[in-house]
Structures are given as C-alpha cells and as structure tokens.
Image: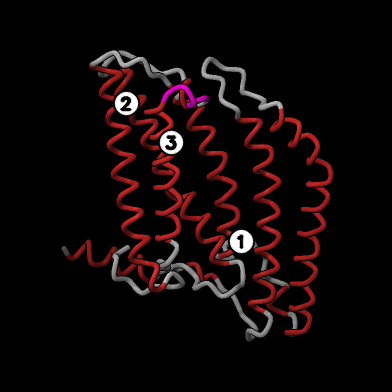
Amino acid sequence: MAENAESLWLKTARKPMYWVMMASICATVLLAALLIVGQFFFDLDTNMRDFLSPSDAPLVMATMIAGAVATLSASVYLSDTCGIIEQQPSGFFDIVSLICSRVSMIGITGVVLVMLFEVVSRYVFEKPTLWANELSLWMAGFIFLLAGLYAMQQRSHIRIYVVYDLFPRWLQKLSDITSVLLIWVFTFMLIWGGYNEARDKFLRWETFGTAWDPPLPATIKPAILIVLALVAIQALSNLIADWNKMPEHHSPLDDIDEVEIEDIRKSIKE
C-alpha cells in the first residue's frame, strides 16, 4: 500500500508510523542476516534454542525485539488502508480486527520464509534444521486464529441466506441478535471450561516435546481463548454497525469479483 494512500484512521500519525515500520524492518533484516551469515560462514555460536530463551544472547534478543516492532508497526500501518475487496471499517472494534488481520497476513509471509530457509539449508548447505516444522506450526496456529477474527469483521464467514432473505427486517434483526447471543454464550462456556487449563499450561510454560521443544501448548491454548473473546466482541460490533442498514438480498452473483475478472481480461489482452 502506498505511503500516500488515503488514511482510514492514523491521519497525521501515518507518516511517522511509516518510518518506524521501515526502520524496524531494516534493523530486523540486518540482524537476521548477521545471524544467518554467522551460522553458515563464521561458526557463530547461536542457534534457534536461543530464540526460546534469548536473555543470554544479546544479538538474538535484539533481533526478536526488532522483529516484534516491525510486525506491530507494519500491521498498524497496513491497517490504515483497505483493499479493493475489503469492507470499510464501520464498527467500534473494526480497527483492532484489521490490525490483527495484518499480523496474520505478515505471518503467512513468515511461514513461507521459514520453509524457504529450511529448503536452502537442507539441500544447498546440507544442514537441515530441527526447528522449521515446529516454527511453521506455531506461526500457522496464530494465523488461523487471527484469520477467523478477520473473517468475522469482513462478514465473510459462512452464512446461510436462503431463509434469512425471506424474513422482514425486524425478524432479520432478531436473528442477528440471536446469533450474537449464541456466540457470546459459546465464548463464555469455552472460556469457563478452558481457562484453568490454559492458565496452567502458560504458568508452567508447557512445551511441545520435540528436539527444538517450543512452548506451543503454553501459547496456543491461551491464544484460543483470547481470540475467541475478540471474535465475540467483533460480532457485537458488527451487530451495532449493521443495525440501521437496509435489508440485504443475496444471490450467487455476489461471489463474482468484478475487479479480478477485469484484471484477467487485461492480462489476456496483454
């Protein structure tokens, strides 16, 4: 997204956020390059176990901090504009969900880079890793959860309109209230039943039991409950934002992406 694109919510803070993003990305790339070059060519005594306990490895700690700042600042900056097929934010919680969605999108890139590193390391340098599979699973877990929150914000989750479209507007509103209420009941019951287990796994920092042994259970289990609570809040935000909208009628034509079709036509002509 271009720096001069129309701002949704950052306004005057957009340009400073852009420079924070660029500086932190450059710092992350530089530090990561130092770690990789040092591992392959200078026998630098650094490995992926240091990323699980970086307090004794200053370079690793600096890389992790720079990466966290880069991810957060990039997510905030990219959430300030909407794609062509995205819905404009209208609810009180939409900006939070958009930021989380950008974290998920960046995470997909991270998974691709991890797998690329594994392929190059294994087949070019003959140094396969013990951590690439676990790290990709770890990242994919968070991506999956945040993608669910994004789907709720975009109203792109599975909905069956065959009967809903036949209802008068007052009955559609009643159906929407019932749906949100059921989401909140489900969320409450799941948090009620899973809180103690999630807390215990986090406090004892439960690990995955593999050679690299990352704390997947200690982080994923609490994340499920947290993101589910965010989904429930987003559902309420959608209900409030859509309350005064005119009745909608849906058809298979709604799934047609005119922009994508036009891009295909242009590519064929070229």
Q: Which residues are magenta?
A: 53-57
1 vs 3, front mark: 3
- How many marks can you see? 3
| Secondary structure of residue under mark 3 | helix
| Secondary structure of residue under mark 2 | helix
Q: Can you identify the residue that label 1 sits on?
A: 152
Whether 55 is among the magenta residues is yes
Left or right: 4 as drawn, with respect to 129: left
| Secondary structure of residue under mark 1 | helix
Q: Which mark is residue 64?
A: 3
Q: Nearer the viewer, residue 24 or 260?
A: 24
Left or right: 107 as drawn, with respect to 195: left
Whole-percent x and y of residue 195? 78, 41
Of the numbered discs 1 and 2, the one sitting upstream in the chain is 2
Three-letter code for the amino acid on which mark 3 is drawn: Met
Q: Which residue does the image show at 57% across and 39% down from the upper left?
A: 141
Please, is residue 34 above or below residue 152 in the view?
above
Q: Which residue does the image show at 39% across and 47% down from the upper left?
A: 70
Of the numbered discs 1 and 3, the one sitting upstream in the chain is 3
Whether 118 is among the magenta residues is no
Q: Can you identify the residue that label 2 sits on?
A: 35
Q: Which residue does the image show at 69% across and 33% down from the upper left?
A: 202
Mark 2 is surrounded, within 10 Å at the Cα level, by few (under 14), some (14 to 19) or many (20 or more) other residues, namely some
Three-letter code for the amino acid on which mark 1 is drawn: Met
Left or right: 72 as drawn, with respect to 263: right
> Spatial distance from mark 1 to mark 3, Cα to Cα?
30 Å
**Could you tell me if the residues under marks 1 and 2 are in contact, i.e. CB atoms within 8 Å?**
no
